[in-house]
Image: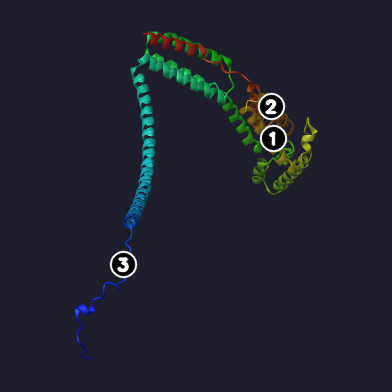
């Protein structure tokens, strides 16, 4: 275990026995290797840095894209809300515009009415009177054309003449002369008053049911004649006289009954006596229909048709009804008058009055 220390001299190898040292590497190759390693390390570090920097930029870009997408979504929602609000405002604006247009139209109409009113107030009194007369006469002409009666025109012309008479203006005397001339022309025309004719026909139609027929039983039978004188005389006599008076009264009554059994009457139309009682209703209704047709023809101004129906009605009244009866005579006379007056006559136009009013208006405007 305890060995003696070796001396340094002994331990040192001899120079002759030492191995040979390796040959040193060329200095140029080692330098290029070091430079290459340094470059590779620098490139690797640069690549790592560039990759890390690129990754950081990508993350930043992703974050920015997410943020911008969120901002875009918010802006799109705000844009939709703003679009809805704009639509509502557009609707309100359209409604307000329509209301404003209506108010403008109303204001325009009121303005035109005010202008007309101002013009009417600015007219002279003569112009107002003449304008009223012209309007009244034209309305009367329309009523005359509709009704076929000259009464509306006559009444209007009379009222115009009375109004001008109260007005008493020498400048309008020419108009009064024209009105008088037109009044004479309308009166001389003899225009048919259809209203009066239809009223007469209505009266005849209402009386048809009460007119007696030739075939009626109460017309063929005579009336029993009472004997009040014989009865009074028999009351003051004796018993025998009373018996004689009773026989006389009985004989008189028997003679009256026998006389009523046979009655001789001259009839021009034998077929009128052949009308049965149940046919009398249809005869009267046919006469009513004939008169109603004549009335409608008069209202429609078909005077030829009305005349034909009225002639047929006259023939029926003369043939089947008792002409000696007062009601039948009145009905025949009424139908005859209507048939005579039912003719087409044109109502003269008041051209002289209208021309005089136009001349007076022109003179008033010229002043």
Within 10 Å of the Cα at label 2, are there few (<14), some (14-19), or many (20+) other Cα atoms?
A: some
**Mark 3 to mark 1 CA distance (whole Å):** 172 Å
Q: Quadrant of the C terminus?
A: top left
Q: Label 1 near label 2: C-beta < 8 Å? A: no
User: Which numbered disc flags the more N-terminal residue, 2 or 1?
Assistant: 1
Q: Which residue is mark 3?
A: 21
The picture places residue 183, in percent across and down from the top left corner, at 51, 14
Residue 141 x, y percent position in the rendering = 52, 21
Q: Earlier in the sequence, mark 3 or mark 2?
A: 3
Element carrying mark 2: helix
The residue lying at 42 percent from left, 19 percent from top is: 132
Is 276 placed left or right of 120 in the picture?
A: right
In depth, the one of 256 and 149 nearer the eye is 149
Q: Which residue is mark 2?
A: 305
Q: Nearer the viewer, mark 3 or mark 2?
A: 3
Q: Secondary structure at mark 3?
A: loop
Query: Looking at the image, which residue sits at the far front?
Result: 16
- Examine the image and state in which quarter residue 261 appears: top right
Q: Name the residue at 20% across, 78% down.
A: 9
- Residue positioned 72% across, 32% down in the render: 316
Q: In the rendered image of this protein, does residue 306 appear above or below residue 212? A: above
User: Callout 1 environment at 10 Å: few (<14), some (14 to 19), or many (20+)?
Assistant: many
**Residue 287 marker:** 1
The answer for how far apart the CA atoms under marks 3 and 2 are is 165 Å
Query: First in sequence: mark 3 or mark 1?
Result: 3
């Amino acid at each position: 275990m305890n060995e003696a220390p070796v001396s340094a001299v002994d331990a040192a190898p001899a120079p002759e026995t030492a191995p040979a040292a390796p040959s040193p590497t060329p200095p140029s190759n080692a330098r290029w290797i070091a430079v290459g390693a340094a470059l590779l390390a620098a490139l690797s570090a640069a690549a790592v840095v560039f990759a890390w920097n690129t990754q950081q930029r990508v993350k930043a870009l992703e974050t920015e894209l997410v943020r911008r997408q969120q901002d875009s979504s918010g802006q799109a929602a705000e844009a939709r809300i703003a679009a809805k609000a704009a639509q509502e405002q557009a609707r309100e604006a359209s409604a307000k515009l329509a209301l404003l247009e209506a108010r403008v139209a109303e204001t325009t109409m009121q303005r035109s009415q005010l202008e007309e009113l101002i013009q009417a107030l600015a007219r002279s009194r003569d112009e107002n009177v003449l304008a009223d007369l012209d309007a009244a006469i034209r309305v009367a002409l329309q009523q005359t054309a509709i009704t076929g009666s000259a009464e509306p025109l006559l009444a209007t012309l009379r009222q115009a003449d009375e109004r001008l008479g109260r007005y008493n203006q020498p400048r309008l005397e020419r108009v009064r002369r024209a009105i008088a001339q037109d009044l004479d022309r309308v009166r001389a025309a003899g225009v048919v008053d259809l209203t009066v004719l239809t009223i007469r026909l209505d009266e005849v139609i209402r009386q048809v049911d009460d007119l007696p027929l030739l075939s009626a039983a109460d017309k063929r039978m005579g009336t029993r004649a009472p004997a009040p004188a014989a009865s009074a005389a028999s009351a003051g006599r004796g018993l025998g006289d009373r018996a004689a008076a009773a026989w006389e009264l009985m004989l008189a009554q028997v003679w009256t009954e026998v006389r009523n059994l046979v009655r001789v009457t001259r009839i021009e139309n034998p077929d009128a006596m052949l009308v049965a009682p149940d046919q009398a209703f249809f005869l009267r209704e046919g006469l009513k229909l004939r008169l109603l047709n004549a009335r409608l023809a008069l209202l429609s101004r078909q005077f030829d048709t009305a005349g034909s129906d009225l002639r047929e009605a006259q023939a029926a009244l003369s043939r089947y009804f008792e002409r000696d009866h007062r009601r039948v005579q009145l009905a025949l006379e009424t139908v005859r008058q209507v048939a005579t007056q039912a003719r087409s006559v044109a109502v003269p136009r008041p051209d002289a009055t209208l021309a005089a009013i136009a001349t007076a208006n022109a003179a008033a405007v010229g002043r």
